[in-house]
Image (cartoon, rainbow, N blue to C red):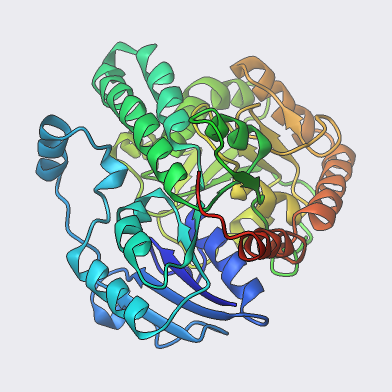
């Protein structure tokens, strides 16, 4: 098939959620299908690679500039959610129009809700391609949870108000986008059910997140490691909230039992709300790193103390593929059929989370058993070699039954 991917950022090298998922799909499909990618590059034309491995054609444009003032104006003067405006670009629209005029595509894969503004061009194209909308998160649900979390803290009430507005707007917008696509993809059955609830007849298929288990391999760690690690884009609100909650509520409880513990937060663009942690000698904020795997490998325990979010966390698959024992909140592990106590430990209160981490730090045998079970679970069910055929099946079902969206 001739498949066009619309992506919010270059999917290669894959270093964060959307790019990891899009590249997992693109790299897996490229050997059997003709792939074209239209994307935004990071900054300046020189930032765009000449080619993506296995991809027939790559087109990139400069991302639009959108200031805080622009966002505030749109919040007050439109009823559209912020994500509907984030990557709206006349230049991107022209490039997409040109691609569609030059060659027909069997399928256009929309890799995230930020790319939904280009649905008008796709639906008006002749011949009209089949459209797949990959909803990486159930976005309205993420904002609903952010609202509930921030509402509990008076200093966060302005952020809670923002999330309340976005939640209501996204619920309407996300439903509209889903109805206009021929198929919607969700990362978990829970997300799929939430999306189906947005309107009757919505066709939502589950294609989980995956991981390259040959790239994320277990490595030996020191016999007495004391490090904890968290990875993620650190200006992403759920990640910021998770790290602040862990540092304030959980880490002191661990330190009371294990004095030399160290918490490493690995990820680009640390938000200014995290600046309060920089003076803590037990915490390191790395900022951008070339590769997160060495940091995961050196840690004794991977922590995922998330309290806000939707979809599923690719970071868990990466840590588990490396045989790392994981402690997560129930929300952090949401969407995966893990068995608590076998592939990871679950804890939702500060006391329980600290106890789970301390138990692992004091038991090398438990760390090994949990890590091995996690690695086996992920390798069997979540390697991209198992996931990509599920996406191909969605495409083939559309091609064989091209009746269009409801």
Residue 128 vertical placement versus 288 (above, below): below
- Name, please, the residue furthest toward the front: 403
Q: Position of residue 123 (x, y in %)?
A: 37, 60
Q: From this viewpoint, is residue 184 visible?
A: yes
* Number of dots carrying numbers: 0
Q: From this viewpoint, is residue 260 visible?
A: no
Q: Position of residue 268 (x, y in %)?
A: 40, 54
Q: Position of residue 189 (x, y in %)?
A: 67, 37
Which sits in the foreground, 231 or 93?
A: 93
Which sits in the foreground, 317 or 76?
A: 76
> Residue, x 76% and y 46% (percent of image)?
224
Q: Give the quadrant of the N terminus.
A: bottom right
Q: Position of residue 258 (x, y in %)?
A: 67, 29
Residue 45 placement, left or right of 229: left
Residue 217 placement, left or right of 234: right
Residue 288 vertical placement versus 240 (above, below): below
> Residue, x 59% and y 18% (percent of image)?
350
Which sits in the foreground, 153 or 21?
A: 21
Q: Quadrant of residue 291?
A: bottom right
> Residue, x 66% and y 26% (percent of image)?
330
Which sits in the foreground, 288 or 359?
A: 288
> Residue, x 74% and y 50% (percent of image)?
320
Residue 197 placement, left or right of 93: right
């Amino acid at each position: 098939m001739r498949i066009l991917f619309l992506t919010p950022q270059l999917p290669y090298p894959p270093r964060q959620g959307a790019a990891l998922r899009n590249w997992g799909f693109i790299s897996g499909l490229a050997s059997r299908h003709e792939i074209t990618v239209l994307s935004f590059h990071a900054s300046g034309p020189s930032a765009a690679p000449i080619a993506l491995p296995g991809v027939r054609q790559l087109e990139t444009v400069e991302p639009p500039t959108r200031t805080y003032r622009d966002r505030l104006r749109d919040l007050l003067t439109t009823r559209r959610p912020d994500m509907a405006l984030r990557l709206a670009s006349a230049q991107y629209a022209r490039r997409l129009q040109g691609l569609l005029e030059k060659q027909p595509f069997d399928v256009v894969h929309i890799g995230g809700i930020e790319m939904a503004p280009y649905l008008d061009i796709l639906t008006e194209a002749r011949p009209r391609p089949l459209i797949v909308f990959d909803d990486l998160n159930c976005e309205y649900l993420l904002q609903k949870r952010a609202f509930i979390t921030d509402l509990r803290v008076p200093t966060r009430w302005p952020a809670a108000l923002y999330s309340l507005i976005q939640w209501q707007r996204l619920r309407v917008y996300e439903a509209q986008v889903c109805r206009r696509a021929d198929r919607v993809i969700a990362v978990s059955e829970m997300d799929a059910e939430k999306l189906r609830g947005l309107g009757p007849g919505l066709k939502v298929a589950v294609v989980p997140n995956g991981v390259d288990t040959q790239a994320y391999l277990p490595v030996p760690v020191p016999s007495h490691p004391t490090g904890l690690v968290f990875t993620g884009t650190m200006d992403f609100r759920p990640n910021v909230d998770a790290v602040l909650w862990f540092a304030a509520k959980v880490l002191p409880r661990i330190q009371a039992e294990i004095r030399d513990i160290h918490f490493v937060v690995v990820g680009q663009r640390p938000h200014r709300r995290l600046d309060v942690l920089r003076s803590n000698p037990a915490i390191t904020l790395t900022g951008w790193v070339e590769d997160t795997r060495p940091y995961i490998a050196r840690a004794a325990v991977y922590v995922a103390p998330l309290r806000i979010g939707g979809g599923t966390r690719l970071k868990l698959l990466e840590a588990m593929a490396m045989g790392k024992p994981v402690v997560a909140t129930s929300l952090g592990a949401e969407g995966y059929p893990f068995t608590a106590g076998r592939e990871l430990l679950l804890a939702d209160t500060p006391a329980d989370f600290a106890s789970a981490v301390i138990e692992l730090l004091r038991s090398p045998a438990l760390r090994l058993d949990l890590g091995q079970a996690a690695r086996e679970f992920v390798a069997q069910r979540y390697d991209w070699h198992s996931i990509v055929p599920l996406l191909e099946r969605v495409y083939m079902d559309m091609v064989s039954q091209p009746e269009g969206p409801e």
